[in-house]
Amino acid sequence: MYNSEKPDLADLPSTARLLKSTALAAVAAVAILVTVVLPAEYGIDPTGAGGVLGLTEMGDIKSQLAEEAELDHQTSLPSTESSTPIINALLGLFINTAHAQDTEQPWTDEVTFTLEPGEGIEYKLVMQQDAEAQFLWSASGGRVNFDLHGDGDGQNISYEKGRGTTGEQGVLKAKFTGNHGWFWRNRDKQAVTVTLQVRGDYEALERQ
């Protein structure tokens, strides 16, 4: 074995030199960090040297790419926060629809009558001019002819006529103050049952 010679104490660096070297290394590291690393990696250029060396633009590009990658990552992940408003909106739609059906205004008047073959009948609403009433009527067991018309104060009007019909629904708007409604006649060979339902702005439903 060979014994290495011990270094002479005079050749070893003193504590002051070590501290000085450490301080210089730290200053150099900080300088490199500020002038090279920060501009090149993060686009941060406190000294302006990164802009001169073209490193700041590189850092800006890297930061932008990192932000875009993070946004893409977040977009691809299922988000309960973003889906919650959609779910709530759908639930609200179903609830509102159900509520509207439950609270729909009921029919004010309803009459049902049977017409023998060749028999006719007339029901009218007593209404003021421009008043509106919703109606729904249906015929079961056969078909009927009808005439939706109005009269009053010497005026007459025919709104609609139909032949061989099994029902209708809509809104009746009075053209003038008077009686407005339907005349039905059974032209079938068997008895037909008709049901009329009405609601809206009228004073009475009367058989004529």
Image: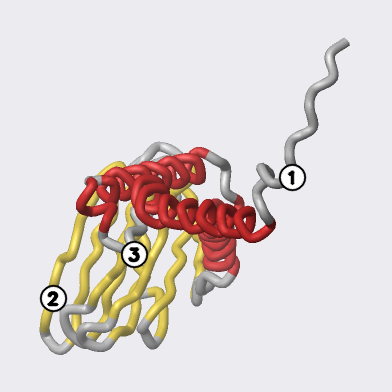
**Which class describes the residues within 10 Å of circle 2: few (<14), some (14-19), or many (20+)?**
some
Q: Residue at x 60, y 67 (%)?
A: 102
Residue 158 visible: yes
User: In this figure, which residue is indicated by the disc labeled 1?
Assistant: 9
Query: Which mark sits nearer the N-terminus, 2 or 3?
Result: 3
Q: Position of residue 163 (x, y in %)?
A: 25, 45
Q: Secondary structure at mark 1?
A: loop
Picture coordinates of residue 131, whole percent (x, y)? 27, 83
| The N terminus sits in image quarter | top right
* Residue that appears at 66% across and 42% down: 11
Front of the two marks 2 and 1: 1
- Cα distance between the residues tagged 2 and 1: 131 Å
* Residue 191 visible within the image: no
Labels 1, 3: front one: 1
SS assignment at label 3 = loop
Query: What residue does disc 3 label?
Result: 46
Tell whether 43 sits left or right of 90.
Answer: left
**Extreme-top residue of the structure:** 1
Q: Amino acid at mark 1?
A: Leu
Residue neighbourhood size for the residue with mark 3, other residues' Cα within 10 Å, grouped as few (<14), some (14–19), many (≥20): few
- Where's residue 198, x and y in %? 43, 70
**The quarter of the displayed image where residue 117 is located:** top left
Residues at discs 2 and 1 in contact (Cβ within 8 Å): no
Circles 1 and 3 in contact, beta carbons < 8 Å: no
Give the label on residue 156, or none.
2
For marks 2 and 1, the one nearer the N-term is 1
